[in-house]
Image: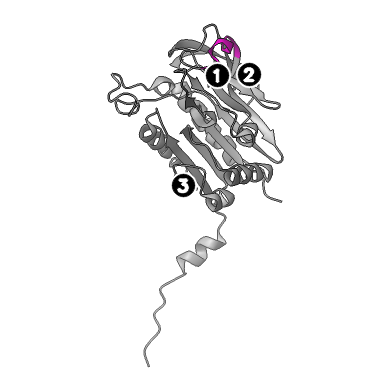
Amino acid sequence: MSERIDHGPDPLAAATEQDHPARIDCVLIAGGVWHDIDFARLELLKLLAEDPRVRTRVFEDFESLDAIRDADILISYTCNVKPSDAAQETLRDWIEAGGRWYALHGTNSILKLMDDGLFHAPREAPLFMEVLGSQFLTHPPIAPYTVTVADPDHELVSGVEPFETTDELYHLETHGDLHVLLETECTEEGTGFAEAADAPGVHPVMYIKERGRGAVLYNTLGHCRGHYDLQPMAEWWPTVDRCAWELPVYYLLLRRGLNWIKARPAAG
């Protein structure tokens, strides 16, 4: 009769008995046009990887509905990616049930180049824009502008001083009550957009839009473009644009935003 060898406690059993942090399932949606999506995707994945609890699935659009339903958190960097009606309804239901979504830069952009030579912002996804809290309409030429803090007591922007960035200054059509955290004043009209004349004024740069038990955190900063990202309109873009991505304060806002969405309310 063979002698039983004691290999000690089962490490998997021991791990389940210890107090250990729960896994966080994240969906990252990075896709679209006119931007260096590869750069943004990689930078966001690196930030998400700073927390070993986070397991991330990556998609180019909003159509992986089961993945969104199962996600704990959602982050998006897109441009001209319009969700289907089913995806819009899934996003709405997920937010209302307590989901938190960090939406970046062009997520709220749906644009069409029309016969007048201008980009129009058709109101083709009203539920999507209502959930996000805004729709992009136009921006002036990329140039330096100053971002100021609208609510210095909020944890997401506490201690942040006014800062200058060279980025796309978004003129937004807003939807519902927004808790504005950062804002800026636009003094120039947009260029190449049908609603360019409406751009001057004070516009939100970062805000929270609550819905049900959940919320969207929107940050309009973070334009990026490489040499090949305007194809087929232009074969070669002469510069590599990183805009707010070059600023330490932008990474501070990204990290704080990720921590904020991870602190979503407990289910129940």
Q: Position of residue 196 (x, y in %)?
A: 53, 13
Q: Amino acid at mark 3?
A: Thr
Compared to 120, does 63 lie above or below? below
Q: Earlier in the sequence, mark 1 or mark 3?
A: 3
Instruction: Please give the residue where the numbered disc 3 appears in the rendered image.
Output: 56
Is residue 159 among what the camera can see? no
Q: Position of residue 66 (x, y in %)?
A: 55, 53
Q: Secondary structure at mark 3?
A: strand
Q: Nearer the viewer, residue 157 or 138?
A: 138
Instruction: Say the numbered circle drawn on residue 152.
Output: 2
Is residue 183 among what the camera can see? yes
In the figure, residue 128 lies in which quadrant? top right
From mark 3 to mark 2, how far is it between C-alphas?
31 Å
Q: Nearer the viewer, residue 248 or 129?
A: 129
**86 to the left or right of 233:** right
Instruction: Say the numbered circle drawn on residue 160.
Output: 1
User: In the image, which is nearer the foreground, mark 1 or mark 3?
Assistant: 3
Tell me where the magenta segment starts and ends, as one range.
Answer: 194-202
Q: Position of residue 28 (x, y in %)?
A: 48, 42
Q: Is residue 195 magenta?
A: yes
Residue name at image x 47 percent, y 40 percent: 29
Q: Amino acid at mark 1?
A: Val
Q: Residue furthest top?
A: 187
Q: Residues within 10 Å of mark 2 (few under 14, many from 20)?
A: some
Q: Nearer the viewer, residue 178 or 234?
A: 234
Q: Residues within 10 Å of mark 3 (few under 14, many from 20)?
A: some
For the residues labelled 1 and 2, say whether their Cβ atoms are less than 8 Å apart: yes
Q: Nearer the viewer, residue 151 or 26?
A: 26
